[in-house]
Amino acid sequence: MSNNNDNAISDSKDCEQYINQFIQEFTIRSAEIGQGTVIKRALPSRHKRMVGAWCFLDHAGPVSFPAGDGLDVGPHPHIGLQTFTWMIAGTMMHTDSLGSKQLIRPKQVNLMTAGRGISHTEVAPESETQMHAAQLWIALPDDQLNIDPKFEHYPELPVVSKDQVEFTVLVGDFLQTTSPVQVHTPLVGVDLTAQADTRTRIPLNPEFEYAFMALEGTARVNGHVLTADNMVVLETGLTEIEVELTQGHRLLLIGGEPFESPILLWWNFVGRSMQDLQQAREDWVNHAARFGEIPDYQGKRLEAPVLPDQMRASK
């Protein structure tokens, strides 16, 4: 699900200024991945490029399809990031150039660290008929940008309940509960699912910025209505927030310390300079060893888009 078809360069220095000091909401857009699968893309946005080190957020589904018609994303490369997949419904097979092959099931996380370079595929099994997932990218900090690639699968995540809300701690520390998922900057990620109509107050780290996204149904975040078509962002300085949920509705909460360095995001690459992105594209086109191969995949690997004008001009 991580093939980014947006050919524009996302510069984390370039975003609109908020009027409200702490809380803002903005509309998110739709995009298409794989074989016509429509997703909601919340990050990056012209309103907000990053939330902590979280630099990319897609919400795919829930969607049903005939067996054999599921998502099939061929080999594609990554640098400078970690891909993070939270599966809510359905299954997906991950295969990468390290030789990893892992079926992800509901309530599981796949974490792939690209570092200096990796390639992978994501393919729904022939028998699969549904998909619902959130996929995010985490920008690696400067001192980890070119680390060796790695893949990790987390079949179980810790769950804690409060005020009739089930909180699955995906990343970091939340409500005195720690996720086993290994990241490289201070982050948090939580799935909130209401067991009944409820209202709860959530503690926040004032050094973190946060964002809420609706995965199923709607909610209210300090009075801001959250739907499938918008995102609520919280700037640093808040110590708690009130959330109202209807039974069965589900939210995603992400947060982290504002990222240390400006980043550039283009296609499937995260870098610090135009040269980083240009070199990665050139290496993919030329089958450089840094991205490896996936011989098991029956099909073509993805072609890199044409360089945007500003990248060509900087060569």
Image: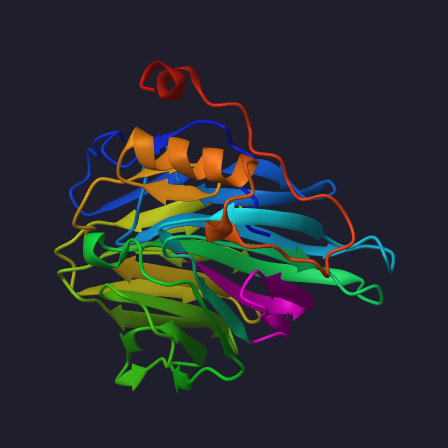
Q: Is residue 203 magenta?
A: no
Name the residue at 19% across, 33% down. 19
The answer to whether residue 249 is seen in the rendering is no
Q: Nearer the viewer, residue 160 or 91?
A: 91
Vertical arrangement, residue 262 with respect to residue 228, above or below: above
Vertical arrangement, residue 251 with respect to residue 274, above or below: below
Quadrant of the rendering where the C terminus is positioned:
top left
Relative to residue 286, is residue 146 drawn left or right?
Answer: left
Estimate the x, y position of residue 113 in percent, counting from the top left.
Answer: 41, 62
Estimate the x, y position of residue 2 in percent, counting from the top left.
Answer: 55, 50
The answer to whether residue 153 is seen in the rendering is yes
Q: Nearer the viewer, residue 126 or 65?
A: 126
Find the magenta span and give its range.
82-107
Name the residue at 43% across, 39% down. 280
Estimate the x, y position of residue 23 in percent, counting from the top left.
Answer: 25, 47
Relative to residue 172, is residue 245 drawn left or right?
Answer: right
Q: Is residue 88 magenta?
A: yes
